[in-house]
Image (cartoon, rainbow, N blue to C red):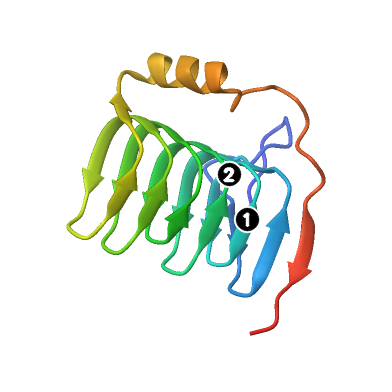
């Protein structure tokens, strides 16, 4: 059961948004919790807590989060304030800016890795335009046939 405080915000609860296998989101995606991508996102993904790209999942755009766990494919930069994990058989085509990184054997990174404190990660993301402050474009769900 969801608990809410006086400001109508979730208290002690994390939201989970799942982009399922066979689904495509076109446009920027934002969440105050966790985003799990099993399908495809064409656009940037911002999640306060975590972005998880499952095996077979694809993000065509930048990621901005506290923790990124990549088991699929990312074609864009990753800005993870705390931690990035690149799992076996995953592929990153873009730069990674993070405080801590783990790359498992078989994980592929085609880009620069820059490690720094969280403030440095936010500054790099801001300079790259990942923190533009604008409203995300309206997501559009496109069913793909399998």
Q: At 29% from the left edge and 53% from the top edge, which residue is drawn?
A: 108
Residue, far bottom: 146
Q: Earlier in the sequence, mark 1 or mark 2?
A: 1
Q: Secondary structure at mark 2?
A: loop
Tag 1 near tag 2, CB within 8 Å:
yes
Q: At 26% from the left edge and 62% from the top edge, which residue is drawn?
A: 88
Residue, far left: 105
**Residue matched to label 2:** 61
| Residue 133 position in % (x across, y down) | 70, 22
Q: Nearer the viewer, residue 74 or 133?
A: 74
| Residue 131 position in % (x across, y down) | 61, 24
| Residue 112 position in % (x across, y down) | 33, 32
Q: Nearer the viewer, residue 66 or 120?
A: 120
Question: Label 1 crowding class (10 Å Cα cut-off): few <14, some 14-19, many 20+?
Answer: many
Q: At 30% from the left edge and 20% from the top edge, which residue is drawn?
A: 116
Q: Is residue 1 visible?
A: no
Q: Quadrant of the N terminus?
A: bottom right
**Residue matched to label 1:** 41
Q: Is residue 136 visible?
A: yes
């Amino acid at each position: 059961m969801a608990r809410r405080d006086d400001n109508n915000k979730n208290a002690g609860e994390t939201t989970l948004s799942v982009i399922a296998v066979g689904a495509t989101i076109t446009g920027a995606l934002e969440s105050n919790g966790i985003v799990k991508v099993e399908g495809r996102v064409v656009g940037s993904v911002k999640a306060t807590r975590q972005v998880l790209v499952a095996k077979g999942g694809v993000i065509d755009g930048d990621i901005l989060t506290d923790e990124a766990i990549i088991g699929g494919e990312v074609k864009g930069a990753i800005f993870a304030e705390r931690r990035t994990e690149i799992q076996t058989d995953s592929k990153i085509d873009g730069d990674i800016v993070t405080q801590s990184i783990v790359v498992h054997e078989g994980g592929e990174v085609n880009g620069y890795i820059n490690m720094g404190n969280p403030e440095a990660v936010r500054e790099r993301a801001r300079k790259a335009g990942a923190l533009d402050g604008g409203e995300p474009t309206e997501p559009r769900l496109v069913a793909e046939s399998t």
